[in-house]
Image: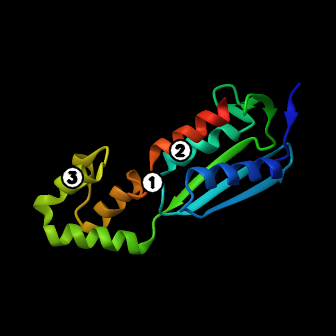
Amino acid sequence: MTKHYSVTETAKLIRAALKEAFPETKFSVRSSSYSMGASIDVSWTDGPISAQVDLIVKGFAGASFDGMQDLKSHHSSMLNGEKVSFGADYVHTSREVSKAKVAAIAALLEAKGRDHWLTICVQAGHPFPTRAVQRHDNAQDVARSILQHVADAKFEGRKASAVAERLAA
């Protein structure tokens, strides 16, 4: 038997999972119902990168879309070992980076000089450090690129992975 969650109940589950995985980050979780469906929008400032939040929230989507066939398909999921159906067709995420964070990293980049930007990107854990430095000609843009790809230092990725695995179990 499949347990059905409304879009509002699904949003509450997402809030709880995010609070457990990222206790120091404040998230906005908003549900929307519309003709023939519903969705949830998750937004936050700083903290974990989108890929880390997606690890948690994408499992709460109750549908998928095949653009080749122009077809939305509903599916069930597992939550704590129980077969469930979530009320939100899609879950969207959006991360903002604060001006203060950009300014702090840009100041570091400017203080070290352009010759050290690649080293700083590598040390920060940027997945494409060479591209970040080659594509941007000022410290502000390099700082934004670093923050787009690298979470705050206080975030532990292992915790988010553990939460996601438990939800799917």
Q: How is the image coloured?
A: rainbow
Q: Is residue 25 visible?
A: yes
- Which quadrant of the figure contains the C terminus? top right
Residue corresponding to mark 1: 155
Residue 50 relative to residue 73: left or right: left
Q: Is residue 72 visible?
A: no
Q: Report if the CB atoms under discs 1 and 2 are less than 8 Å apart.
A: yes
Of residues 95 and 123, the one drawn nearer to the viewer in this rendering:
123
* Identity of the residue drawn at 33% across and 74% down: 103
User: Of residues 129 and 169, which is closer to you in this image?
Assistant: 169
Q: Quadrant of residue 143?
A: bottom left
Q: Amino acid at mark 3?
A: Gln
Pointer 3 residue: 134
Sequence-first tag of 3 and 2:
3
Judging by the rendered image, the residue that carries numbered circle 2 is 160
Closer to viewer: mark 3 or mark 2? 2
Foreground mark, 1 or 3, reads: 1
Whether pointer 3 and pointer 2 mark residues with C-beta atoms closer than 8 Å, the reply is: no
* Residue at the image point whose x is 48% and y is 54% from the top: 48
Give 135 or 64, whichever is nearer the viewer: 64
Q: Horizontal and vertical percent for residue 29? A: 69, 58
Q: Residue furthest right?
A: 1
Amino acid type, label 1 = Phe
Give the image location of residue 92, x and y in percent: 63, 49
Circle nearer the N terminus (1, 2) = 1
Please tell me which residue is depicted at 85% across the width and 42% down the height of the picture: 36
